[in-house]
Each structure stands twice: as C-alpha cells, then as structure tokens.
Amino acid sequence: MMFVTPLVREDLARIPTSIEGKFYLGGPYTFDDLLREPDDYGDEEIDWHSAQIKQSGNVQARTAQIDITSAHHRVKPGAWPGGPSRVDYTMRYLYREAINTEILGVVLLKVSHEIHGVSKGFQTVCKKVIQSIYVRPSNQGRGIARILLAVVLEAAPDVCVHPQFSVEGARLFGFDREGRRG
C-alpha cells in the first residue's frame, strides 16, 4: 500500500513549464478517451497500487486504487553515427475508487530519453512532461488531480508541465489568466 498526501497549491506552483516563459490558455478540454481501460487504450504494462490518501485536519483517510501504465516505446535512431538516438514512451497514472471500478482521473506523462554517443561511453538526457490531466466532470473538486500529481512527483521529482492549460488547469498550477504565477 502506498501512502499519498495530496499536493497543496504551493507544491503545484513550483512545477516548471516544459517551455520556459511560454503559456497558452485554451479549452475547456475533454479527454474522455484518456479514461479508457488499459487494454482498450493500448497500454503494455500496468502496475496496480492500493493507496491510502491522507486528508487534512481530522478527516478520516480514504483509500483508492492508483494504476500506473506504460504504452509502446518508440525508438528513433540517430541521423548519423554518434548522433543522438531517442526513446519515447507515454505513461498514464489512473485514479479509481477501488479495484475494477471506473477510471475517474488520469495524468498523462510523456517521457523522452535522448542518448548521445560520446568518447568512451554514452550520455543520456531524460525529460518528463505532464502532457494532460483530466478528471471526469462529475468527480471534479475531490482532489483527484492533486492526488495523482503527488504520485507523479514522488516517482519523477524533475517533472515539468506542458504550458497549454484550460482555465481550471492554469488555476491548479498557480497561473492567472495572463500566465503569471502568484
């Protein structure tokens, strides 16, 4: 069992954007297809975790099911000998109330490893970008996004976020409508 403390606003505001200085406001976005079951979505590997969610104050902790899935890895060889090769894959962090219940929320994380051949070895650069966050509309306001983001940050503390947001997403990460963090 994993223990998860939902992120607070200050923690979310510290997550950098993947393109420094950029901010795009759009939406509202609907990503219902991200809520598909792993077999239907094409995920290859799944880790199932029971989670106990710590609540603030004297509220009793709740339990949930957090599934971490990984899709196909794509490899792009270097254009010339010694040129950088790249391995990309997508992970989904899925939130459910219990095992075998419907998926209520998802965080889509894109991971990219760039491998450079250098004299006497290799050098790697890894970039992890939160591409999308989506919570089923009937379950918004329950802290599901904050819970999933806490799990993502636990696994990847160097994660950044793609700078295209809905109004709610911008607010979640501490941005105002003009892209300023407050």
Image (cartoon, helix red, strand yellow):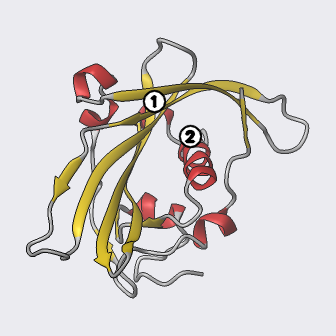
On the image, the x and y values in percent for residue 96 come to 52, 25
| Rendered view: 165 above or below 140 | below
Left-right relation of 53 to 176:
right
Taking the spot 39% from the left edge, 62% from the top edge, the residue there is 129
Q: Quadrant of the C terminus?
A: bottom right
Q: Are the two marked residues, 2 and 1, in contact with CB atoms closer than 8 angstroms? A: yes
Q: Quadrant of residue 22?
A: bottom left
| Rendered view: 119 above or below 174 | below
On the image, the x and y values in percent for residue 69 come to 40, 34
Say whether disc 2 or disc 1 marks the residue closer to the N-terminus: 1
Q: Residue furthest bottom?
A: 21
Taking the spot 27% from the left edge, 44% from the top edge, the residue there is 30
Q: Nearer the viewer, residue 59 or 159?
A: 159
How many marks are shown on the rendered structure?
A: 2
The residue beneath circle 2 is: 144
Q: Nearer the viewer, residue 160 or 23?
A: 160
Left-right relation of 118 to 9:
left
Label 1 SS:
strand
Q: Residue furthest left?
A: 79
* Crowdedness near tag 2: few (<14), some (14–19) or many (≥20) residues, C-alpha within 10 Å: many
Q: Amino acid at mark 1?
A: Leu
On the image, the x and y values in percent for residue 134 come to 39, 44
The residue beneath circle 1 is: 104
